[in-house]
Image (cartoon, grey):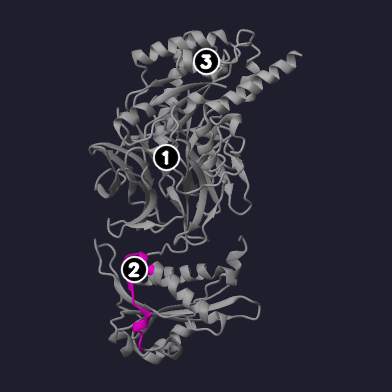
Amino acid sequence: MRTTFVSLFAALLLVAACETSPDEAASTAGAGASTESTGEAGVASAAVTPGAGMVTPGVTPESRAGGPAVAALTPETATLSREPSAAGRAVAAIPKGSQEDFVLNVGDTIYFDYDKSILTPESQRTLEQQAVWLKQFPGAAVTIQGHADERGTREYNLALGDRRATAVKNFLTALGVDDTSIEILSYGKERPAALGHNEAAWAQNRRGVTIIN
Amino acid sequence: MTNYRRYLVPLRPTFLALLLVAAVGAPAVAELKIDITRGKVEPMPIAVTWFVGKGAEARLGIKLANVISADLERSGLFRPLNPKAFIQKPEAMQVRPRFGDWRQINAEALVNGTVERLRDGRLKVTFRLWDVFAEAQMTGFIYRAPPGKWRRVAHKISDEIYKRVTGETGYFDTRIVYIAEGGPAKQRVKRLAMMDQDGANHRFLTDGRDLVLTPRFSPTAQEITYLAYYQGKPRVYILNLDTKQQEVVGNFPNMTFSPRFSPDGNAIIMSLATEGNTDIYVMDLRTRKVRRLTKHPAIDTSPSFAPDGRRIAFNSDRGGSQQIYVMDAEGRKAQRVSFGRGRYATPVWSPRSDLLAFTKMQGGRFYIGVMRPDGSGERLLAEGFLVEGPTWAPNGRMLMFFRQNKGRGVDSGAIKLYSIDLTGYNEREVVTPIDASDPAWSPLIP
């Protein structure tokens, strides 16, 4: 009985996910299965098969905002909805301990100055909240992504992204977050969050993003 | 492919040349020469006539001449003449050209040849290069090759012409490996792709599932080393082009990147990131032994060996900003060599050992330039909103790089490959099916 309820609830979540973003799903699928899904479209758009993997020229940039923030309505996340507190409030539908919960209540992204990996006071405040949140879910596997803007060379930016992600990790572990559950992953300038070729976009792309896996 | 060398034996037709020289009675030393050490050169007018053959080989003869003409034209050093202007027909030239006919259309050099099919199915291609004014043969070769390899025969002939006229090794029988990219900027799909130096025989080597970056050839051109985010973990891989097998280089707990082969092909030099610090390591591919070459809290990356394997150029921000350094092969005696304004990156040692190509960032612009390994003689060759990743043709005369134009608003500008002469002249787009970055020029194909 309980199992039924849980899967029903999971199904509701999926439907909700679909409904909140019909345009996204459509546009992603409309891109001719050109992109692989890294979870943003999630389970909702199963049509986006990684195997397709074809590079199609002239695919328009996605209009979706938020980047990794919308991530991961994966089956695992749905399983987390077993949390009793979330049950019965299908409308709210943000499971505690999920990336969504993290983004909404804490904030997953901090920003860096040009060519720097020093944590600004603002970043430190965000990371302090991240630490508090993460310590509530000691089992959660966490990946910290480090990113750079497009104004550096590719390899240097990979190193810079690694340096930034490590700065975030070190700060979190100093605040008592279990360091064995934290992985770091540098994308250099490969995965911008903001489009455009100006300082406003670059400032948003010099970032560290904490992902709850 | 491995057996290919067997089929493609260039035969130096010494006896032919001797006979002709005797018949003409002219000195064997031709005066026709392009001095490519000067800046801009006036391209040499050359008549590349269609190779004479029968039936299907006649059509192939035209294609051979077209590929050779295109090679020579792209070099910026030759100006192939329009075949419509030819007075003497190639079919009538089999004994000896009527040089007066070629002088009349201002050809300084003349190429003719024949193509026939041997009984074993292979092609036999003969070519000769003539000095029109000296009325003498400059060089001549016979090639035998499987029909599918006719483009390589054409490129080898281009290489011989280039070599005979400029005095330097050619670069036409080479390939380019690069990153083909498409899709939205936030979720770019990148694939390894390879093509001949002239854009022919284009093919994708990976399916785009994993992010791949910075491919580079081994000295035999049989392997490619590159960075792949396979299973979400960025690591250095080697792809064997013959067997299509891929293997991860070493067993590292953290990100490895910016790989290049050592000049002898027995080692990979690369960066390893540990605890937020990037240093340079070298791994022997036979013993699997790893040596750490730099130990500095700064970012040390983009290493490149000198052709003799005794020095390594790399970039580091140990002095506060990203600059180029040169150290010995053991990682000792690191010395900063770039002292101009701005940031300097991605040093790549010229195959002729005399120069480093680099990427420079200054005042919101990017540049491709060259300097001597001690940092002197800096010259900027190309610029743009983003230009990056220079790679050398095997003769050290041409470079390739990629350029991204500044897009409007949220649009990303096109990303394309370009080649440019070392002198800074003759910049040309290298046409690819979709956007392209991270080019690497192969050595001459063995």
Residues A111 and B213: in front is A111
Q: Which residues are magenta?
A: B72-87
Q: Which mark is residue B303?
A: 1
Subunit under mark 1 = B
Find disc 2 in the rendering and name its residue: B166
Seen in the image, is B297 located left or right of residue A1? left
Q: Amino acid at mark 2?
A: Thr
- Tell me if I can see residue B338 in this picture: no
- Within the magenta stretch, is there residue B75? yes
Q: Residues within 10 Å of mark 3 (few under 14, many from 20)?
A: some
Subunit under mark 2 = B
Q: Amino acid at mark 1?
A: Pro
> Residue B268: x percent and y percent?
51, 41
Viewer-nearest of discs 1 and 3: 3
Looking at the rendered structure, whether the residues under marks 2 and 3 are on a common chain is answered as no
Q: How far separated are the C-alphas under marks 1 and 3?
A: 43 Å
> Residue A170: x percent and y percent?
46, 15
Find disc 3 in the rendering and name its residue: A101
> Residue B400: x percent and y percent?
38, 53
Residues B104 and B324: in front is B104
Where is A96 relative to A24, above or below?
Answer: above
